[in-house]
Amino acid sequence: MLAMILKEFRQVRRDKRTLAMMIMLPIMLLIVFGYAARFDIPEIRTAVLGPAADQAARALQEPFDVVEIDPSATAETAETLLRDGDAVVAIVTGEDPTVYVDGTELFTAQSALRRAGALPDDVAVEILFNPDLSTSAVMVPALIGLVLLAMGTVVTSLGVVRERQDGTLEQLAVMPLRPRDVIAGKIAPYFLVGLVDLAVITIVGLWLFDVPFRGSVLAFAAGVFLFLFAVLGIGVLISTLSRTQGEAIQLAIMTLLPQVLLSGMIFPLYSMPPGIRWIAYLLPLTYFTMIARGIFLKATPLDALAFPYLALVVLAVVVFGIAVLRFRRDLAPARSRPVEEVSM
Amino acid sequence: MTWGVRDLTVDYGAARALDGVTVAAPAGEVTVVVGGDGAGKSTLLRVLAGIPVPHRGEVSRPDPRRIAFVPTGSGTIQDLTVAENLDFVARAYRLRHWRERADRLLERTDLASFRDRLGRELSGGMRQKLGVIMGMLPSPDLIVLDEPTTGVDPVSRSEVWRLLAAAAGEQAALLVASTYLDEAERASTVVVLHRGRVLLSGTPAQVSSSLAGSIVDVDRPSDPSLAWPRGARWREWRPGGDPGGVRPDLEDVVIAASLAVEEGPS
């Protein structure tokens, strides 16, 4: 037994990457998730509209954070602001004072509703987009992204590593294939499988959990397309960073965990401290969640989702760019060298 | 056409893998690079094949479309069938009218009836033969093979060598790394690498006759540092010569030359 224990200790000691991960990762995860995993809502982005907007805004106290005051706006504006994600609560003052709450922001909506209990009786409260505050309606669109992410990152990350372990990567380097040909070839099947996967889980999700789909299918397809690119790009990048399939899976899981907790899928982004929130903005699932919830539940128009679409484009380009560069370094420089005849 | 490297030096960190190595691989010939583990064979092959390895020195190789590399372990793709492996190569090299050639190569190596068998289901020898066929399929000008017969049974080794000879017959230049000295006898040129340097090079006959001193066959060596077992007996290198010497074969010469470098006598 001692022989076995000693062998394992020696192997673990030499596997510096795993060792570092075992020691550093728990500390990092605890700190990041400790700050991110908050059910309390420190601020509720609120728009105050209608003739008495200024007065009502002054009366609001924490956690209501007034992001817009517009005395000329109406209930229609309130719905637009909530649909486009500019505010979570819109208070419309006037003859029929009404508080509109975005039901897709589950925790924030619940927090706002608790406080709405103290309002005078003549103030109506209306929950938009998810009136029953259904958890499934909020979670399923984001979960579709998570499932794609888990499948796409892990499976793709194994692709290049397998070539390296089988000893065929160098053969590919010698073949007249460009690095981008190799990457495109690697992701094409997973991209197709990802699309089929997505169609199936979306249909099952809608049917099984009775989640509405109110927006444009095309807009959703565009979001999925960009998201898949970013996800598969991360997989390929991990693949170029890993020496073994075990390492690739470890790294893939490392990228999955933060996305689960930091993407806004469970905890609202703006309840996280700014130091943690910027990590969320580097994660593709954050933007997929914005797009999917917006399209499924609020029929958010394309222009209001421009930022998440653009962010996914940037992420996909950056991640793929790095992956191709790493591939080029591993596979291609020899091609660019001038080949001179050597007289022997 | 002759491909090859001149004054090639490769460093892996502080360790020098190749030190001023010059090797030529002429068209229509099989050049075998022999040497022990860590001699620098694979590094030499990788540089010549065009795999990115930081190096100094001149390298002469054909256009990527005209090179094939057969890595250690054959380079066959385990999850593809024999036919699919060949199809992949044909597409990667954008070959036309390749099926007839593939069929001929498969027939010649008795792999024709295994077209639908997965790479991982082939025996070691079959896999190596498929690897060589994959290298030959595009009719490249240069085929670089890293130990294509390691771990292969004697019959398959012989078949692999027949394939290599056929490739040379098609005017390809072949550079083959091997740990088997008996294989080097089949080559047009043998290059003996030792600790990153060319120890000996020439035709097998030239290399065999290049040794200074003589080799004796003894029951018990007089100087164990200059002796190596051969069957139940010993061979011993006598740097100063010995009238009772035997006619050395390539194995004797390579070992003696390595000992000369290690032990220092000249």
Image: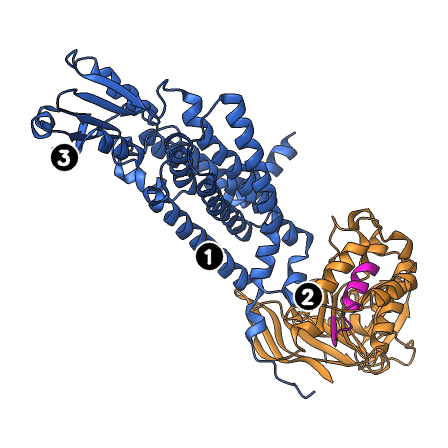
Chain colours: A blue, B orange
Q: Residue at x 17, y 26 (%)?
A: A92
Secondary structure under the numbered disc 2 in the rendered image: helix
Q: Which residue is mark 3?
A: A70
Q: With respect to residue A258, does B215 lie above or below?
A: below
Secondary structure under the numbered disc 3 in the rendered image: strand
Label 1 and label 3: CA atoms lie apart by 45 Å
Please provide the residue range marked out in magenta: B129-143
Asked if residue A166 is among those painted magenta in the image, a careful observer would answer no
- Tell whether A105 sits left or right of B143: left
From the top left corner, tell me how far across and down residue A106 is, in percent: 34, 24
- Tell whether B217 sits left or right of B258: right
Q: Which quadrant is home to the C terminus of chain A?
A: bottom right
Q: Which residue is mark 2?
A: B42
Asked whether the residues under marks 2 and 1 belong to the same chain, the reply is no
* Tag 1 subunit: A
Q: Residue at x 58, y 72 (%)?
A: A335
Viewer-proximal residue among A125 and A179: A125
Asked if residue B130 is among those painted magenta in the image, a careful observer would answer yes
Q: With respect to residue B243, does A144 lie above or below?
A: above
* Residue sticking out furthest to the top: A121
Q: With respect to residue A326, does A338 lie above or below?
A: below
Secondary structure under the numbered disc 1 in the rendered image: helix
Q: Which residue is mark 1?
A: A322
Which three-letter amino acid code belongs to the residue tagged 1?
Ile
From the top left corner, tell me how far across and down residue A332 is, in percent: 57, 67
Q: With respect to residue A278, does B97 lie above or below?
A: below
Which three-letter amino acid code belongs to the residue tagged 2?
Ser
Which three-letter amino acid code belongs to the residue tagged 3?
Asp
Q: Are marks 2 and 3 in contact (CB under 8 Å)?
A: no
